[in-house]
Image (cartoon, grey):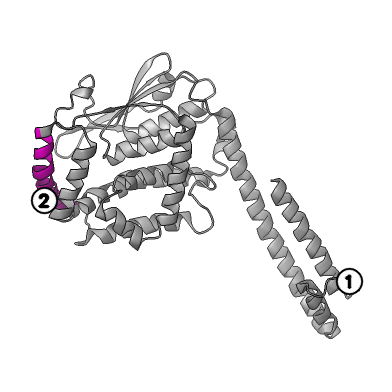
């Protein structure tokens, strides 16, 4: 803030000199200064022109000063939000042990890792065999990611968005343990139109804050609504664009499964069958997904449109949706897009959308978090 204050003082000093020139007073300004020539120009004008010029300049100063004040206050609030998080966030040494059960190439698992890495939280990874899934036989919940948290009592957390909201709540809580936090995200079981039981979670996009902390972490109600809206958009829309794009053609499907087998936990025979038969199967599955989600014949266009929609929501005047630092929506979008790295779909996205600069900033922030953790 010191540098901003000094710059503000300098601007104010120039405004004072500027206004004196408009009043026709003699000024000892350097001949090269734009204020000198403007003052000379105004002094040579008629009183009527001078009066009009003074009015226009006054309006310009008021508007300029108001805009400057707005950006100064906005920057200050963002800094205060970051300080508040640093002040109240529990450190990794606060007795929390985390184990993540995952598939490395799963977009939902990737966004959980992005969140944990950004917050410099140490965690163990258990790579799950996608065929046998014996690593999660302890759980009735047969999907990944699953996070096991232990702060004195072991707790299982399911669903990527619940994991992120719950751990963020825990980090920002003053007195609540992990068991108490999880109680805020109850399971809701129901049956879908096909009669299959599905599990949903109440409040999965809410970070549960105490009243006195809410304004510090979300300076405006709009900031909180925006974060929740785009986190939900990631789960409801963006993630469904990944498979149709990475399995778009037989060649891309084979390339994708080569990556999946290389990074995943497969036996030799499993890997062979997964690579060739899995690629063929997913190529046809991607066609059904395209129909289910009403995608274009060229699914790249849906990906480009979604990514540019995200970038338009951030706008040109902030580096992240969270302001100076990524928020949970930034981390979710980055985590999902990251699983395409090394594939043709990722290269095409980088070349045909406006996401590249934001993505690089996200990479840098994730890497900083990992360095702190190490």
Residue numbers of the magenta segment: 269-289
Report the front residue among 105 and 326. 105
Q: 85 above or below 124?
A: below
Q: Is residue 183 visible?
A: no
> What residue is rendered at 44% in x and 46% in y?
362
Q: Position of residue 284 (x, y in %)?
A: 11, 50
Q: Residue furthest right?
A: 26
Quarter-wise, where is residue 141 in the image? top left
Quickly name the residue at label 2.
284
Q: Is residue 338 left or right of residue 128?
A: right
Q: Position of residue 193 (x, y in %)?
A: 17, 40
> What residue is rendered at 40% in x and 56% in y?
355
In the structure shown, which secondary structural element does the residue marked by tag 1 occupy? loop
Q: 193 above or below 168?
A: below
- Residue 282 on the magenta span: yes
Quarter-wise, where is residue 265 in the image? top left
> What residue is rendered at 29% in x and 41% in y?
107
Quickly name the residue at label 1.
27
> What residue is rendered at 19% in x and 37% in y?
192
Query: Pointer 2: residues within 10 angstroms few (<14), some, or many (20+)?
Result: some
């Amino acid at each position: 803030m010191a540098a901003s204050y000094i710059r503000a003082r300098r601007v104010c000093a120039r405004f004072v000199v500027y206004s004196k020139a408009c009043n026709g007073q003699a000024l000892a300004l350097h001949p090269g200064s734009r204020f000198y020539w403007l003052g000379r120009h105004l002094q040579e004008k008629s009183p009527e022109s001078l009066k009009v010029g003074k009015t226009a300049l006054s309006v310009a100063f008021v508007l300029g000063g108001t805009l400057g004040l707005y950006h100064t206050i906005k920057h200050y609030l963002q800094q205060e939000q970051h300080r508040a998080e640093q002040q109240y966030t529990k450190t990794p040494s606060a007795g929390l042990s985390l184990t993540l059960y995952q598939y490395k190439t799963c977009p939902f698992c990737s966004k959980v890792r992005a969140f944990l890495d950004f917050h410099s939280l140490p965690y163990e990874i258990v790579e799950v065999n996608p065929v046998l899934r014996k690593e999660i036989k302890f759980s009735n919940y047969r999907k990944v990611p699953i996070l096991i948290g232990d702060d004195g009592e072991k707790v299982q957390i399911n669903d990527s968005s619940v994991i992120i909201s719950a751990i963020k709540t825990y980090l920002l809580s003053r007195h609540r343990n992990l068991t108490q936090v999880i109680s805020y995200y109850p399971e809701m079981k129901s049956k879908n139109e096909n009669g299959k039981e599905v599990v949903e979670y109440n409040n999965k996009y809410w970070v549960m804050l105490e009243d006195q902390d809410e304004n510090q972490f979300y300076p405006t109600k709009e900031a909180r609504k925006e974060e929740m809206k785009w986190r939900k958009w990631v789960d409801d829309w963006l993630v469904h664009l990944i498979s149709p794009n990475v399995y778009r053609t037989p060649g891309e499907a084979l390339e994708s499964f080569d990556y999946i087998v290389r990074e995943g936990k497969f036996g030799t025979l499993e890997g062979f069958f997964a690579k060739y038969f899995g690629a063929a199967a997913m190529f046809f599955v991607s066609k059904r997904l395209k129909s289910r989600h009403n995608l274009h014949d060229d699914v790249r266009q849906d990906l480009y449109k979604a990514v540019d929609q995200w970038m338009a929501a951030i706008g040109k005047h902030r580096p992240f949706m969270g302001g100076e630092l990524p928020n949970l929506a930034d981390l979710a979008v980055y985590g999902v897009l990251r699983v395409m790295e090394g594939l043709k779909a990722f290269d095409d996205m980088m070349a045909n959308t406006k996401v590249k600069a934001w993505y690089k900033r996200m990479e840098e922030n994730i890497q900083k978090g990992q360095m702190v953790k190490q």
